Image (cartoon, rainbow, N blue to C red):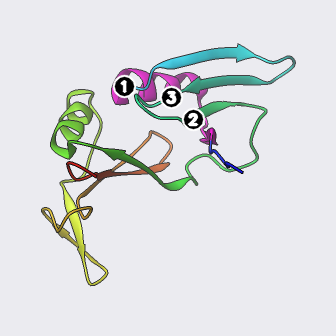
Amino acid sequence: MDWKLEVVIVPVSDVDRAKRFYHEQVGFPIDHDTGAGGPMRIVQLTPPGSGCSIVLGTGIATMTPGTLQGVQLVVADLDAARQQLIDGGVEVSPIRHLVHGVWQDGRGEPWNAFIFFSDPDGNGWTVQERPAGS
């Protein structure tokens, strides 16, 4: 049986601000922005190439805005991804890697290169580089 992760709810305080951030600054296309009746609103965006979307909205989550941490994206070119975020006005860390559980600047061995950014509410994202041919 396949178990496919399709949606991660991202708790935000201002749906329109978060929608602008993820779409205009990070570059996630908007799948839909739908009112589902009453106070419910669902904004779904999908990272390019991903089978999993994120959902922002009202009336859909009980998590406190900014409490989602460590959602991880994987890219083929970490330098290009970092530059895209910078070009979008996103504050992003330098490339880092782990050595015996301690973060250090620069790249490590294959699969050990990461960058980090947060949305306006403080939800934290990790971006990892997938080595060529993996």
Q: Is residue 116 left or right of residue 36?
A: left
Amino acid type of the residue that numbered disc 1 sits on in the rendered structure: Gly
CA separation, marks 2 and 1?
A: 13 Å
Give 52 or 19, whichever is nearer the viewer: 52
Task: Give above or below for 70 relative to 16.
Answer: below
Amino acid type of the residue that numbered disc 2 sits on in the rendered structure: Ile
The answer to which of marks 3 and 1 sits earlier in the sequence is 1
Label 3 Cα neighbours within 10 Å, binned few <14 / some 14-19 / many ≥20: many
Q: Cβ–Cβ below 8 Å for labels 3 and 1? A: no
Q: Is residue 9 magenta?
A: yes
Per the image, the residue denoted by label 2 is: 54
CA separation, marks 3 and 1?
A: 9 Å
Q: Is residue 73 left or right of residue 110?
A: right
Q: Quick one: SS at disc 2? A: strand
Image position, residue 82 (x, y; %): 22, 41
Task: Give above or below for 81 relative to 68.
Answer: above
The dot on residue 46 is 3
CA separation, marks 3 and 2?
A: 6 Å
Image position, residue 19 (x, y; %): 51, 24
Residue at 18 percent across and 54 percent down: it is 94
Residue at 79 percent across and 24 percent down: it is 40
Give 132 or 41, whichever is nearer the viewer: 132
Give 90 or 26, whichever is nearer the viewer: 26
Amino acid type of the residue that numbered disc 3 sits on in the rendered structure: Thr
Residue at 56 percent across and 18 percent down: it is 31
Q: Cβ–Cβ below 8 Å for labels 3 and 2? A: yes
Per the image, the residue denoted by label 1 is: 27
Magenta region, residue range: 6-26
Give 67 or 78, whichever is nearer the viewer: 78
Q: Nearer the viewer, mark 3 or mark 1?
A: 3
Q: Quick one: SS at disc 3? A: loop
